[in-house]
Image: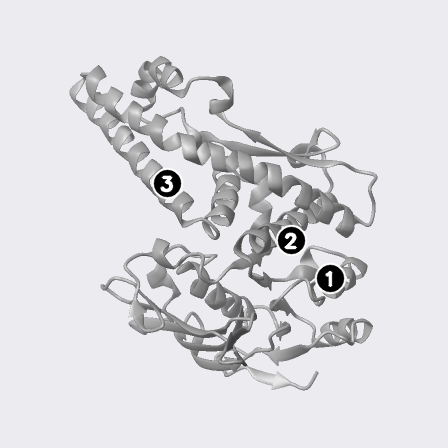
């Protein structure tokens, strides 16, 4: 599947834009602050119905306006045969945010009842300079990465996670109420303990299965990007469910949770630890190793989704020159320009650098766009 056309109204610094893209590689070139990343984020919106960078929808409305709209026309890259003739499946997606009103998500002009109904229809992988939080940030960032990957290919998993998070929220609210009235009701908290146990089981099982399939893909890409097999990267799934019966752990933690006023046990505390040769990446790895680790994570995410969804995700590469040296960028461009990958978007500040990269990969079909503040994006001859 690829994005053929993108239309914007009042999105961030764009009054309007109407762009037609290559089904292979698209380069967005311009100075910092001109809106390259905003275009990338608009594409992300069409897949996840939210911004990659700003969780508050209203803050993505152009200053002084009351709404924004992002529209995308997608074409399925696998043709279908109808009456002996080959055709393609086309789909339209719209995200509309208006001040004081619920967000509207439309798929082929039909209003979606929720974000979860839409997530997974447009598979997408985002690579951004902000990805360093996967290594340096808290466990919630790594859980979000895993959950986002699985959710794009399994709506049932997304539903389970949402139900589990609601149960944790209810249990936390009950703990706060106990603190206010200075009374702990064992029976009431026990009901939510049982709910957490029931809802944890499928999440834990799916995360385990994910790790079994994902880690070999990740290691393969790490060695490819590093151009070496001298280092052994690994990811280890750390969960309290590894330690035994969850219900017993919840019961044992009740008094501690009452003092903390939140739930300290469950799969919402899971983490995924990163290592290179048994040394923690966060503490002992160089910046170059961390960048290679992160990019390998995202390319493995691409392959995992491709294998399960049967469709090539759209790949967004924001400011990859900040992540890799020029030789590895050349290697990456040759890789993503191959038949294994589908549509790719990348951003850079230097038009000449992008064009020189394509001279080493002339077989890659591409379009280069110049991005200017407050103006339409003009295509440059590649």
Label 3: state its secondary structure.
helix
Where residue 249 appears, as percent x and y from the top left, is 40, 17
Q: Earlier in the sequence, mark 1 or mark 2?
A: 2
What x and y, as percent, mark residue 286? 74, 41
Q: Which residue in the structure is indicated by mark 2?
A: 299
Q: Which of marks 3 and 2 precedes in the sequence?
A: 3
Dot 3 and dot 1 residues touching (CB under 8 Å):
no
Question: Label 3 to label 1, Cα distance in Å?
Answer: 35 Å
Decide: is 226 above or below 201. Answer: below
Between 306 and 84, the one lying in front of the other is 84
Mark 2 vs mark 3, foreground winner is: 3
Residue placed most toward the observer, 65 or 203: 203
Q: Is residue 202 above or below residue 20?
A: above
Q: Which mark is residue 335?
A: 1
Mark 1 Cα shell of 10 Å, populated few (<14), some (14-19), many (≥20): some
Question: From this viewpoint, is residue 184 visible?
Answer: no
Q: Secondary structure at mark 2?
A: helix
Residue farthest to the left, as pictured:
181
Q: Is residue 349 left or right of residue 91?
A: right
The residue that mark 3 highlights is 160
């Amino acid at each position: 599947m690829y994005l053929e056309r993108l239309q914007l109204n009042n999105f961030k610094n764009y009054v309007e834009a109407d762009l037609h893209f290559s089904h292979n590689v698209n380069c967005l070139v311009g100075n910092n602050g001109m809106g390259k990343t905003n275009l990338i984020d608009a594409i992300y919106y069409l897949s996840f119905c939210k911004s990659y960078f700003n969780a508050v929808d209203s803050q993505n409305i152009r200053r002084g306006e009351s709404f924004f709209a992002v529209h995308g026309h997608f074409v399925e890259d696998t043709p279908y045969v109808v009456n002996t003739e080959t055709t393609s499946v086309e789909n339209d997606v719209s995200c509309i945010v208006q001040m004081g009103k619920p967000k509207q998500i439309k798929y082929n002009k039909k209003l979606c009842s929720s974000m979860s109904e839409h997530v997974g229809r447009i598979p997408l992988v985002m690579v951004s300079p902000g990805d360093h939080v996967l290594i340096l940030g808290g466990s919630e960032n790594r859980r979000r990465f895993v959950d986002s990957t699985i959710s794009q290919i399994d709506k049932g998993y997304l539903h389970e996670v949402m139900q589990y998070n609601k149960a944790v929220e209810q249990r936390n609210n009950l703990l706060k109420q106990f603190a206010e009235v200075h009374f702990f009701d064992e029976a009431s908290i026990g009901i939510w303990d049982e709910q957490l146990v029931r809802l944890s089981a499928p999440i834990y099982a799916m995360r385990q299965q994910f790790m079994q399939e994902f880690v070999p893909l990740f290691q393969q890409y790490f060695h490819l990007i590093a151009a070496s097999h001298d280092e052994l990267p690994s990811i280890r799934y750390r969960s309290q469910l590894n330690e035994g019966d969850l219900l017993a752990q919840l019961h044992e933690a009740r008094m501690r949770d009452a003092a903390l006023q939140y739930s300290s046990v469950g799969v919402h505390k899971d983490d995924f630890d990163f290592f290179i040769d048994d040394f923690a990446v966060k503490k002992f790895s160089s910046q170059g190793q961390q960048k290679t680790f992160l990019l390998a994570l995202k390319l493995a995410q691409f392959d995992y989704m491709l294998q399960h969804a049967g469709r090539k995700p759209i790949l967004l590469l924001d400011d990859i020159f900040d992540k890799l040296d020029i030789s590895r960028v050349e290697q990456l461009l040759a890789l993503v320009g191959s038949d294994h990958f589908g549509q790719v978007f990348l951003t850079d500040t230097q038009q000449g650098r992008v064009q020189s990269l394509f001279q080493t990969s002339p077989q890659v079909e591409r379009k280069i766009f110049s991005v200017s503040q407050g103006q339409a994006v003009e295509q440059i001859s590649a």
